[in-house]
Amino acid sequence: MGVVHGDLMTLNIGPQHPSTHGVLRLKVKTDGEIISEVEPIIGYLHRCFEKHCENVTYDQVIPYTDRCDYIAAMNNNFGYAVAVEELMEIKVPERVEYIRVIVAELNRIASHLLALGAFGLDVGAFTPFLYMFRDRERILDLFEVLCGARLLYNYIWVGGISHDFPPNFDSKIIEFLDYFEPKIDEYNNLLTFNKIFIERTADIGVLPPEIAISYGVSGPNLRGSGVTWDLRRDDPYSIYDKFDFNIVIGEGEMGTVGDCWDRYFVRMIEMKESVKIIRQALKTLPSGDVHQALPKKIRPPKGSIYKRTESPRGDLAYYIVSDGSPIPYRLKMRSPAFTSLSVLEEISSGWMMSDVLAILGSLDIVLGEIDR
Amino acid sequence: MGLLENKFQDNVVVASMDKLLGWARSTSPWFFQFGLACCAIEMMATAASRHDLMRIGMIPRSSPRQADVMIVAGTVTMKMALRIKKLYEQMANPKYVIAMGSCATSGGPYWQHGYHVLKGVDLVVPVDVYIPGCPPRPEALIEGLLKLQEKIQMDRPLTKKIA
Amino acid sequence: MSDEQIKLIEEAVAKALTGDMDMINNIEDRVTRSKAKAALVKAKREAKKSPVSDSENPPSPAPSKPSVGDEKLSFIDDVVAKALAGDMDAINNIEDRVTRSKAKAALVKAKRLAKSSTVEDAPKPEESTIEDSIPTKKSFYQIVAEAIDKKFTGSLSNNDVNGYIQLNGQNWFEIAQYLRDNPDFLFDSLQCVTGYDYGVEGELEVRYNLHSMTHNHAIEIRIKTNRTNPKVPSVEQVWRIGDWFERETYDMYGIEFEGHRNMSRILLPDDWEGWPLLKDYETQETYHGIVVPKVKDGWE
């Protein structure tokens, strides 16, 4: 008895499909319910980020970095600021470094909450989404107190930050952390160890580490495959080497190492680690002037730099070429979601139609960053 | 309506059919859940726990065939513009469009050098309500939706328009 | 401005050009003073320009050659001579910042020369600085470059490996495989592929950032290509992410990657015209009947 192959059917998902996390189009070739080929078609949100960078000054680039990854805008500001500072050899005050780490980790939590909630939606769990958005709103409220914006902050500047913490802000963060930490267990009860959820995600879309590295996959997706790699520890920027935290990796608790459930669970535990970092940073937060090192004119010397930082989605890098003028000559953003999405083609063939959306959700893509 | 006054019991309302239709339609405009960029996250936040769009009768639909309102939430690019037009054409009449955020209104921050950005969604589809902001807060989106409801209420679908 | 003021400014500038700055500095009215100073700068610049344009020098002087007028050079010489005699005021009083720093540099040089001529057997200062700049231990870039040169002779564009390795594109696919598989390097991750435009007349370039997960080291490799028919060998089959990165570079710069199995646009639509990130890119007027440039009817 041989296997009967019917004709392949081409199915188009998107670009306005609710499960594609934005405007992504998937051209799927299926044999019945089994996927034989997936081709992601991107570019529906190509907003010419790099062309803009070649036309505006260094400080004006920051709002555009916000809009690239609109879910973790702080981390994108952070990476850009760190890159330009290294090019200009600016040393920022200690307090600024601490504040940057605190807000970046808060934003990492917010980003993971959205990723996990949306992943739940993709596999059919609506309620956890509401729970996670409820808590994400609290972080956005904190940011609103801090800099007035809910989503796109423009907070971390080259050489400093736009505002110092308002009075009693530390205690507000502590209050939030105290509230938030037990909630992680609530999510676990609600979604992580839910039988249906495990059935939908465990053993699905296994991403072996060699393939992940060859495809340039990074961040929680790579750690989900069992590779201990985190730029915060392996190539420490800012002051991350001062904090004590664990690197969470996927262990195949519910199935194989590197399946959708592992990628999901790594994000869940990473939020705990972020809470840990914030607590340590708040304990030793030094005082000082945050505007001390802000340069009057941002004119980096001639040269180029490639600087990587760890955004919630992985290695976010900026390649900046300066010709000595106040406008970048060339600015390329290496976005982690771009590389994560490219692996979809590789790992989704052979799975069922509904699994593709689970795999896509577990990769946590942001289209703004993929298309730039 | 002097003739009809006080002729009925309390639970009878007298109104013109036109007004009634407008009132009924305005309180349940289902919107086409269609996120493009940053504004889509704020649209999601509006629909989620805290702001709860359903209390003003807005229910997200995933298909243009079932929706009355299309919220264009985010930057429209050239590649996307033709699709937006197609989606708009698929919606059933009467249909309304909300341009949410400065990108959909005018191209926003991508106005000057964005070679691939559509400078306002009104270049391809007619827009009823513009919501400024980058991105607009959920409160702003709700205000925009309420303004749209006002507009729908003023519609007189049965009245013959004199050309 | 009244005639009086103009006269005052002219007088002050004339005096300043002869070296007497007091008159300008003593002008009481702040606005007039700043105007006088501006006029002085202008006058100085014109003085600086004229000897250059008069002489046989080409319009664009070589960067190594100081483009300072003869008057200024002799002035600097004077000042340095004074400073060597112990009168530092002469240097510190120079108004023009550039001239001042030049004079100071000349002074340092002169002092060093004087020192080396007096102390016998001392190494010449120029030599010692060069020695300092070359580290005794080979840099990682040099090790990689030498390994590439040994295995694939003639594929290095130049031996100056300061922060990057310049290849000429020959054998790039094999070199990439070698770099990935050699146990000393193990560059198993292609971090980034960046297109680069040297300007409207210049060449194009592709820059690769490689990184090794095992050894945790990174290098940058650059390959130049011409502008009229840009072609670079593809490494898509060495690192799988090269597939999308190269398509993106093709999309933005029109650089074709030879051997890529699906060389097509990735971000822009297939029927888009032109390569947007080239420095001489001009936006197309319409796309399927939709106006592309920023001007809308009734705006501006």
Image (cartoon, coloured by chain):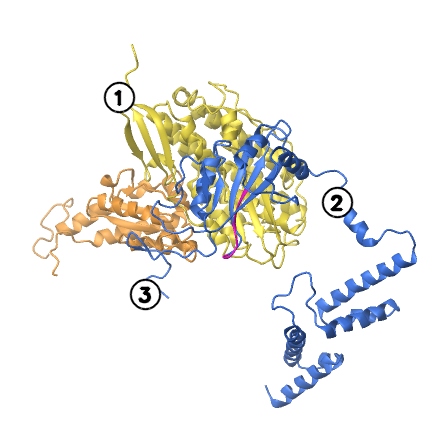
Chain colours: A yellow, B orange, C blue
**Horizontal and vertical percent position of residue A55:** 49, 57
**Horizontal and vertical percent position of residue C8:** 67, 86
**Horizontal and vertical percent position of residue C270:** 35, 44
Amino acid type, callout 2: Ile
**Mark 2 belongs to which subunit?**
C
SS assignment at label 2: loop
Residue assigned mark 1: A6
Amino acid type, callout 3: Gly
Do we see residue C199 in this rendering? yes
Numbered circle sitting on residue A323: none
Q: CA distance from mark 3 to mark 2?
A: 63 Å
SS assignment at label 1: loop
Amino acid type, callout 1: Gly
- Which of pointers 3 and 2 indicates the residue nearer the eye? 2
Residue assigned mark 3: C298
Neighbour tally class for label 3: few under 14, some 14-19, many 20 plus, Cα within 10 Å: few
- Which of pointers 2 and 1 indicates the residue nearer the eye? 2
**Horizontal and vertical percent position of residue A36:** 34, 25
- Which of pointers 3 and 1 indicates the residue nearer the eye? 1
Numbered circle sitting on residue C134: 2
Residue A136 lies in the magenta-colored region:
no
SS assignment at label 3: loop
Neighbour tally class for label 2: few under 14, some 14-19, many 20 plus, Cα within 10 Å: few
Q: CA distance from mark 3 to mark 1?
A: 57 Å
Answer left or right for A202 relative to A296.
Answer: left
Neighbour tally class for label 1: few under 14, some 14-19, many 20 plus, Cα within 10 Å: few
Which residues are drawn in magenta?
C200-207
Q: CA distance from mark 2 to mark 1?
A: 67 Å
Residue C158, picture quadrant:
top right
Do we see residue B15 in this rendering? no
Question: Which residue is at 31% across, 29% downward?
Answer: A29
Mark 3 / mark 2, whichever is N-terminal? 2
